[in-house]
Structures are given as structure tokens and as C-alpha cells.
């Protein structure tokens, strides 16, 4: 079974997006999306773990028997997450303090075990790593979209505190979009995360629908109106 | 049948053990290679936090090497808590106390309070709290300059009555929609000044014992 890189790209970024379609890893998605810098920080960390774990799982896919497959995957993922956590602590200490518990929680993010099981365990190392990259980017994009929306609605500003991630050159990236903005507390608080995510999913489905109508008009192909949730766990045999 | 099962058990256990060893090795190597960097980053963050409270030219010693530990009910301590002694040319210059306000809106608020040797406040920062975002969290400097209203104040400026929020006929502003948080902070800072007023001599007396440490 092999999947073309083009297909992997489309799957990760759009058709089977982990944040909008698979709805996996909602805990960090909702927990750290209250500002752009937090969202991007956790997105990058998750993507790194995802790429490395997919590569490692693919590498050992033929040597590990089914009986101990899952514990081995979990061990690999936990080790990689711990390494990323240590590296963040060493190089982006303040961001590490803000993200706090959500970094070790990457271990329990279902996307990572989901991709290990559904894709990496059945594909070559190259396409598995590429799948990790695309899924990671797809997840990060959704995370950053929610983070930026909530930051903008909640505080009227964008890209606050980006220096926590990019160092002193990002000190002045902050953009005040609305002057004298009173702040919209709901967007910053947890309910705001659910609302924005819901709106994003609706937006994606709406675009899919428009696209389906468009193709139905030009070519008489019966495209599905909305994207269906794709099964992510492997078939047990 | 039986030997086959036991063989597969042995094989699987070995595979698991092998992966456990490899993953532990990877984590251990990463930990070893980042350890000094992490200690450095922690120290830098602490120095930055302390440096924000005291004016740069007011002291010339390494604050992190002049730590004493206090367990003082008046400061809301429940365990040994560090305090930092600042000196200028060997003379006592200031002290940074860590105080806890136990009566925040949602739990304890931890504060760093810098007091100059003459008893005036050089700065206050909230270092840990769980106050409501958008309301009580305006005690953070990143959210509001309110916490700077303590700068230059001392135990007699304002007087006893003035050490309260305006709603309680004091001198300090409260926030719209949040009175409990600033009230807790004002009380904790006032208590810290009372503590300093009573104990500054013995605090600075410990300077010598604190300095002995390498």
C-alpha cells in the first residue's frame, strides 16, 4: 500500500485535516489556542513529535509483532515528547512555562498514535515522515487560525509576545488592530475555543460544499457534499 | 503448543525490553546534553524577574547567590520561601521578599516585593496567580500598569488607612468588576512592609551568613 505525496499533502492539509475533520487532539487544540504564539509553539512541537514518531514507527514496522506493537509505539512517542520538552525548556524557556502541561500531554494526543497506527505502520519511512509533516502542518494551521482569531477577538491585537518563540527580533511584531478595544472575554476563555473551532469546521464544510457544487456543474461527478470523517484506527486483523 | 506460546512470550518481552532500553537511552542523552542549558535558562529567567523589581544601579551583587529562606506567617508563607538580599558596595541596599496573598479571588496570589533599605517599595510583581482572565489578571504588568502604583510607596506613605483599595476608603484603585483581587494584593504588600519594618535589621544581619555560601 502506497499513497502518493500529492494525496498525503491534500489529506493532511485539507481532506483529512487532524483538527477539522479527524477532530483528534482537541484537548491541546482548545487549551493552548488563546494566542497566536501559544498556538504556534504547541503546533510546532506537535509537528516535530509527529514527524519523528512516524519515521521511527515506519522504520520498525516489520520487526515488531502485533502483540507488543502498541506499547512500543507509545514508548517511542513518550520518549520523543520528553526530548522535545527538554529542548523547549533549554531554548524557549518562557514559552515552555506558558505551555506547561500541554507539552507532556503531546504524548496522549490521539493524532500521533492515530497516524502511527493508520499510516506509518503500513508505509515506507519517507512517506510516513512526509505524512507526519503534512498532518503536523495541518494541525498547526488550524491551531494558529483559532489562536489568531481568539487573540484578535479577545484583545484586539495580533502576534503579542512572539519574541517568546522567535527571540528579540520578534519584539515588535505585535499589531494593534483595534485601537482602544475593550476586550471580549468570551473569546479568551475556554468557550471561545469551542465556538471558533465550530465556526472553522462550518467554514470548511461550506467551502467543500461550494466546491462539490462547482464540480457537479462542470463535470457530472457525484462528489460527496461534505467530507466524511475518515477512519483513523487501523483495521485489526 | 505450550513451547510455542512461551517462545512468543519470551520474544515479545525481549522486543519490549529492547525498546524500553533504547527509548530510555535517547531520553537520557537528551537530558544530559540539555541539562546545563536548562539550568542557565532558569537562572536567566529568575535574574530577569528579579532585575525588573530593583533599579539596575541600586545593587551590585548577584541576587541569586544571596538567598535566605523565610517561613513567615505575616508574608503568607507555608514553607521555606526564598528572599533575596541586595547590596551596593557591601552595604545593604534592598531586599526582595516573596509574599503570598491567600485571599485572591481564586486561590493564592504569589508576589515578588522589592523593598529598598530605606523602606520604600521599588517594585511589585505578581509571579503566580489564578485570577480571572480579563478581570483579576490585570495585576500582571503585561495586562495593566496597575501593579506599578506601588512604586515609591512605603509603610507611612500612604498612612495606615490609605493602604486599601478606594472602595474601602484607601488610596489604591480597584479594577472595574474586580475588587477582591486588588484588595488581596494591597493587603499582602502592606503586610510585607510591616514585616520589613519590624525585621529589616535581622534580615540584613543574615547578609554575612548568606554571602559565605559560594
Image (cartoon, helix red, strand yellow):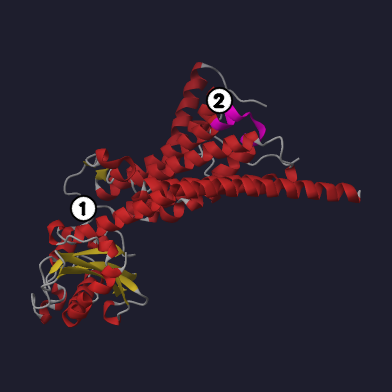
Is there one chain holding both mark 2 and mark 1? yes
- Residue B157 falls in image quadrant: bottom left
Say few, some or many: other residues with alpha carbon within 10 Å of mark 1 (under 14 / 14 to 19 / 20 or more).
few
Instruction: Check disc 1 and report the residue beneath it.
Output: A182
Q: Position of residue B65 (x, y in %)?
A: 29, 63
User: From where the camera sits, is residue B197 visible?
Assistant: yes
Which residue is farthest top? A218
Label 2 vs label 1: CA separation? 45 Å
Which label was assigned to residue A7?
Answer: 2
The stretch of residues the image draws in magenta is: A120-129
Work out whether A206 lies above or below B175.
Answer: above
Q: Mark 2 Cα within 10 Å, few/some/many (few <14, many 20+)?
A: few
At 13% from the left and 61% from the top, the residue drawn is: B58
Q: Does residue A16 belong to the magenta stretch?
A: no
Which chain is disc 1 placed on? A
In the figure, is residue A43 to the left or right of A120?
Answer: left
Name the spot of residue A208 as percent of width and height, x first. Answer: 48, 30
User: Quick one: label 2 or label 1, which is nearer the N terminus?
Assistant: 2
Q: Nearer the viewer, residue B25 or A44?
A: B25
Under circle 2, the secondary element is: helix
Q: Is residue A32 visible?
A: no
Residue A128 part of the magenta-drawn span: yes
B177 or A87, which lies in front?
Answer: A87
Picture quarter with the C terminus of chain A: top right
Depicted B161 relative to depicted B100: above or below: below
Chain identifier of the residue bearing label 2 in the image: A
Report the side of A84 relative to B117 (left or right).
right
Count of marks, rendered view: 2
Residue at x-position 63% and y-position 28%: A124
For the N terminus of chain A, the quadrant is top right
Percent position of residue B211, x then y: 26, 68
Q: Main secondary structure of the magenta part?
A: helix
Amino acid at each position: 500500500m502506497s499513497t502518493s505525496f500529492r494525496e498525503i499533502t491534500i489529506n493532511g492539509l485539507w481532506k483529512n485535516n487532524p483538527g477539522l475533520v479527524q477532530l483528534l487532539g482537541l484537548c491541546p487544540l482548545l487549551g493552548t489556542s488563546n494566542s497566536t504564539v501559544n498556538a504556534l509553539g504547541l503546533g510546532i512541537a506537535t509537528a516535530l513529535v509527529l514527524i519523528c514518531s512516524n519515521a521511527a514507527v515506519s522504520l520498525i514496522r516489520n520487526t515488531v509483532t502485533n502483540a507488543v506493537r502498541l506499547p512500543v509505539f507509545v514508548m517511542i512517542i513518550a520518549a520523543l515528547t520528553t526530548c522535545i520538552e527538554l529542548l523547549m525548556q533549554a531554548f524557549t524557556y518562557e514559552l515552555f512555562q506558558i505551555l506547561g502541561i500541554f507539552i507532556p500531554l503531546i504524548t496522549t494526543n490521539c493524532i500521533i498514535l492515530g497516524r502511527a497506527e493508520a499510516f506509518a505502520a503500513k508505509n515506507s519511512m519517507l512517506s510516513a515522515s512526509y505524512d507526519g509533516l503534512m498532518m503536523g502542518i495541518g494541525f498547526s494551521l488550524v491551531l494558529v487560525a483559532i489562536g489568531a482569531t481568539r487573540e484578535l477577538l479577545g484583545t484586539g491585537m495580533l502576534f503579542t509576545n512572539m519574541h517568546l518563540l522567535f527571540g528579540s527580533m520578534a519584539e515588535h511584531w505585535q499589531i494593534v488592530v483595534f485601537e482602544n478595544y475593550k476586550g471580549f472575554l468570551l473569546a479568551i476563555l475556554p468557550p471561545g475555543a469551542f465556538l471558533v473551532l465550530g465556526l472553522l469546521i462550518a467554514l470548511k464544510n461550506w467551502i467543500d460544499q461550494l466546491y462539490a457544487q462547482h464540480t457537479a456543474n462542470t463535470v457530472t461527478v457525484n462528489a460527496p457534499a461534505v467530507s466524511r470523517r475518515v477512519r483513523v484506527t487501523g483495521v485489526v486483523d | 503448543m505450550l513451547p510455542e506460546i512461551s517462545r512468543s512470550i519470551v520474544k515479545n518481552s525481549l522486543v519490549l525490553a529492547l525498546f524500553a532500553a533504547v527509548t530510555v537511552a535517547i531520553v537520557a542523552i537528551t537530558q544530559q546534553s540539555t541539562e546545563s542549558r536548562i539550568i542557565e535558562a532558569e537562572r536567566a529567567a529568575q535574574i530577569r524577574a528579579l532585575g525588573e523589581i530593583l533599579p539596575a544601579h541600586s545593587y551590585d551583587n548577584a541576587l541569586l547567590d544571596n538567598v535566605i529562606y523565610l517561613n513567615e506567617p505575616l508574608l503568607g508563607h507555608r514553607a521555606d520561601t526564598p528572599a533575596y538580599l541586595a547590596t551596593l558596595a557591601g552595604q545593604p541596599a534592598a531586599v526582595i521578599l516573596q509574599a503570598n496573598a491567600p485571599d485572591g479571588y481564586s486561590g493564592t496570589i504569589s508576589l515578588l516585593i522589592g523593598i529598598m533599605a530605606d523602606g520604600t517599595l521599588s517594585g511589585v510583581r505578581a509571579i503566580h496567580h489564578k485570577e480571572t482572565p480579563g478581570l483579576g489578571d490585570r495585576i500582571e504588568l503585561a495586562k495593566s500598569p496597575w501593579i506599578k502604583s506601588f512604586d515609591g510607596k512605603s509603610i507611612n506613605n500612604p498612612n495606615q488607612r490609605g493602604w486599601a483599595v478606594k472602595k474601602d476608603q484607601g488610596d489604591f484603585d480597584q479594577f472595574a468588576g474586580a475588587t477582591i483581587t486588588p484588595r488581596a494584593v494591597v493587603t499582602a504588600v502592606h503586610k510585607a512592609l510591616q514585616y520589613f519594618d519590624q525585621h529589616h535589621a535581622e534580615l540584613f544581619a543574615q547578609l554575612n551568613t548568606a554571602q559565605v555560601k559560594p
